[in-house]
Image (cartoon, helix red, strand yellow):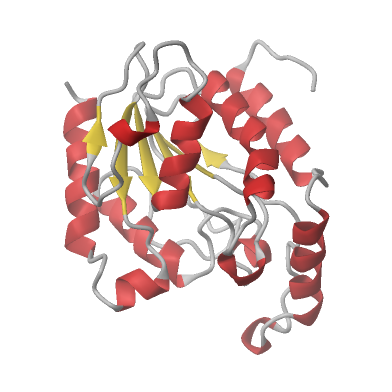
Amino acid sequence: MPESSDPAQALALLQNQVVTCRRCPRLIRHGAKVAREKRRMYRDEDYWGMPVPSFGDPRAELLILGLAPAAHGANRTGRMFTGDRSGDFLYRALHVAGFASQPTSRHRGDGLELKNCYITAALRCAPPGNKPRPQELRNCRPYLEKELLLLSRVRAVLALGRIAFDTYLRLLAGRESFPPRSSFHFAHGASYALPQGLPRLFASYHPSQQNTQTGKLTPEMMHHVLGEIRRFLVR
């Protein structure tokens, strides 16, 4: 990928690389199959059906790390957390916290902008059954690593769910003197100061429909985590 002195341009070039990635044939086949067959309520829509790029403010201080695109959400719309109930929940909370320009996210051209926030995922393709394979997560990790280098102002990382939490820690594990994985316990509302000037790590349950409809994750719980992040960033 050509290098650029402009972080926004470099991020855009990286996302172009993401969209054309074919490292995981199983995932590419699945995304394309879902895009052909569609869900009945979306039968008149053109599905994205490819790896989904990250998006947000290139000067963001907050990086949000999710799991993967939903088959009929981001795999349909082509934008992270857009077009499904997980996104409805997340963007309402981000809007209340001042990180999103509007509380809804329906499609790529709906005017949503992120403020001081950038959204990415551990996996850029929708996995069958929402269950990525370990090798698929490893294949995708270099994209996240490059994003972290380009997003030089990030001071806080919010991991949505255990897989995102573990993915981020595995990415950092090779650094000299980095604490062992056992030093970090995933729990909603947990946060960790990391060494070597790394961003502070915050954890939340994933805003999946399963978690939000059962009350495992409530709007108040998400507002609390985002409030903690907001207070941390203004220090």
Horizontal side of residue 151 vs 190, given as left or right: right
Q: How far from the left and from the top, in percent, is residue 87?
A: 44, 62
In the picture, the quarter occupied by the C terminus is top left
Q: Is residue 75 visible?
A: yes
Please name the residue shown 74% across and 14% down the image.
Answer: 3
Q: How far from the left and from the top, in percent, is residue 62?
A: 37, 33
Horizontal side of residue 160 vs 127, given as left or right: left
Horizontal side of residue 63 vs 28, given as left or right: left
Q: How far from the left and from the top, in percent, is residue 193?
A: 25, 24
Within the image, what quadrant is residue 219 found in? bottom left
Q: Can residue 100 be seen in this view?
A: no
In the picture, the quarter occupied by the N terminus is top right
Horizontal side of residue 120 vs 143, given as left or right: left
Within the image, what quadrant is residue 198 found in? top left
Q: How far from the left and from the top, in percent, is residue 89?
A: 35, 64
Please name the residue shown 36% across and 11% down the image.
Answer: 196
Q: Is residue 212 above or below residue 40?
A: above
Please name the residue shown 20% across and 53% down the image.
Answer: 223
Along the viewing direction, whichever of 91 and 202 lies nearer the viewer: 202
Q: Is residue 228 above or below residue 3?
A: below
Along the viewing direction, whichever of 56 and 148 lies nearer the viewer: 148
Please name the residue shown 64% across and 55% down the image.
Answer: 133
Along the viewing direction, whichever of 63 and 45 lies nearer the viewer: 63
Q: In this view, does 126 lie above or below 6?
A: below
The number of numbered discs placed on residues in the rendered structure image is: 0
The outermost residue toward the bottom is 40
Q: Is residue 160 above or below residue 154?
A: below
